[in-house]
Amino acid sequence: MAIFICSECGHTEETPEEYIGKKARCLSCQTMGTVQAKPPAPPRQSPQPVVKESSAAPPPQDFVKEETPVPQAPASASRSNSLTFVLIGLVAAILVIQLLSIRLNMPASVQWEYKIVSPKDSVIIEELDDLGEQGWEVVTARRASGYNDSYSYEMILKRAK
Ligand SMILES: [Zn+2]
């Protein structure tokens, strides 16, 4: 295609290519001018910016792709940190529970040893004093008969092992 552009009034008129370089008269103001080849560049250049835009579009996508892993790493790190905190809390709770249970079980876990004595009435006080110094405690005491119809206190004692 060819085009006639009037230098006087700006009127444009498309003409066949066979008129390129030939003189023509403006249909609007009758000024003489030259028919020029219609520049095909503008319609072809317009797609090029689109290509540039499309080529410029991927970099942001790459940036987005690069940015997305960065937030993901801290997110996973924070998740692992929260998991470690939870695990530490569980371990601490278990330790506290075990310590409390140990303290609670301590009285029940005390082992007692027992002893049965039947001292003569004449030395029973001295005998109990000695046994008391050794940590023995009387659990039960009863009057029981021994040899030769003699009676004495038969006592069951206990102390912690
Ligand atoms: Zn004109």
Image: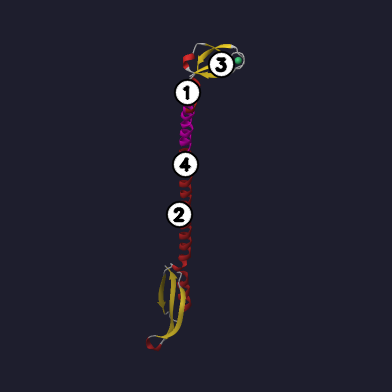
Mark 4 neighbour density, 10 Å: few (under 14) some (14–19) many (20 or more): few
| Residue 59 shown in magenta | yes
Q: Which residues are magenta?
A: 51-68
Residue 20 placed where, x, y %?
49, 13
Q: In this rendering, which labeled residue sits more in front, label 1 or label 2?
A: 1
> Which amino acid is tagged 4?
Gln
Which residue is denoted by mark 2 in the rendering?
Answer: 91
> Which amino acid is tagged 1?
Arg
| Residue 76 shown in magenta | no
Tell me how far mark 1 sits from mark 3, CA to CA: 20 Å
Determine the residue positioned at 40% across, 75% down.
Answer: 115
Quadrant of the drawing holding the C terminus = bottom left
Tell me how far mark 4 sits from mark 2, CA to CA: 28 Å
Q: Based on the displayed image, in which of its 4 quarters is residue 109 positioned?
A: bottom left
Q: Disc 1 or 2, which lies upstream in sequence?
A: 1
Given residues 20 and 98, the one toward you in this image is 20
Tell me how far mark 1 sits from mark 4, CA to CA: 43 Å
Give the number of callouts: 4
Residue 5 can be seen, yes or no: yes
Q: In this rendering, which labeled residue sits more in front, label 1 or label 3?
A: 3
> Which amino acid is tagged 2?
Val
Q: Based on the displayed image, in which of its 4 quarters is residue 91 positioned?
A: bottom left
Residue 32 placed where, x, y %?
58, 11
Tell me how far mark 1 sits from mark 2, CA to CA: 71 Å
Q: In this rendering, which labeled residue sits more in front, label 1 or label 4?
A: 1
Determine the residue positioned at 47% across, 34% down.
Answer: 61
Badge number at residue 5: 3
Determine the residue positioned at 45% across, 75% down.
Answer: 127
Can you say whether 128 is above or below 7 in the image? below
Which residue is denoted by mark 4 in the rendering?
Answer: 72
Is the residue under label 3 in contact with that under label 1 (CB below 8 Å)?
no
